[in-house]
Image (spheres, grey):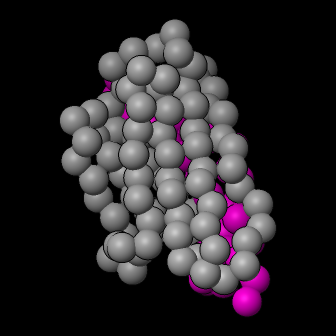
Amino acid sequence: QVQLVESGGGSAQAGGSLRLSCAAPESIFSINAMGWYRQAPGNQRELVASISTIGSRTYADSLKGRFTIFRDNTKNTVYLQMNSLKPEDTAVYYCKIEWFGNDYWGQGTQVTVSS
């Protein structure tokens, strides 16, 4: 079992910024895609952003320009920089990695944006 450790969630005012991080064990190697998803109450989990091994990025259309995903392969860590936050960004954010054909999820971190 691969345990992912998320951090960086919390509360912010609208227009503010937060950075999330998600670390996979440094003992594993060759992680494929890494990404962030979010789930708001009453909604399905949705993709926020993903990044491939070589740095190709995919974003939800509604988030382009405000959120940036990046990864540090030396630390097996993926980050999500969230700027210009809006109340509708309030959700539990989950990271996911793809490793040898399997998906592994973090435990989720709450992000709350107040107006």
Q: Residue at x 39, y 80 (%)?
A: 62
Residue 18, quarter of picture? bottom right
Would you place residue 72 above or below residue 37 in this image?
above
Whether residue 104 is in magenta: the answer is: yes
Quarter of the figure with the N terminus: top right
Q: Residue at x 33, y 19 (%)?
A: 30
Would you place residue 69 above or below residue 96 in this image?
below
Whether residue 78 is in magenta: the answer is: no
Q: Nearer the viewer, residue 96 or 14?
A: 14
Across and down, in percent, residue 32 comes to 32, 31
Q: Residue at x 58, y 76 (%)?
A: 85
Highlighted range, magenta: 86-115
Q: What secondary structure is the magenta-colored segment mainly?
A: strand
Across and down, in percent, residue 37 comes to 51, 58
Q: Among all residues in the image, which is located at the extreme front?
A: 16
Residue 83 appears in the rendering: yes
The answer to whether 31 appears left or right of 58 in the picture is right
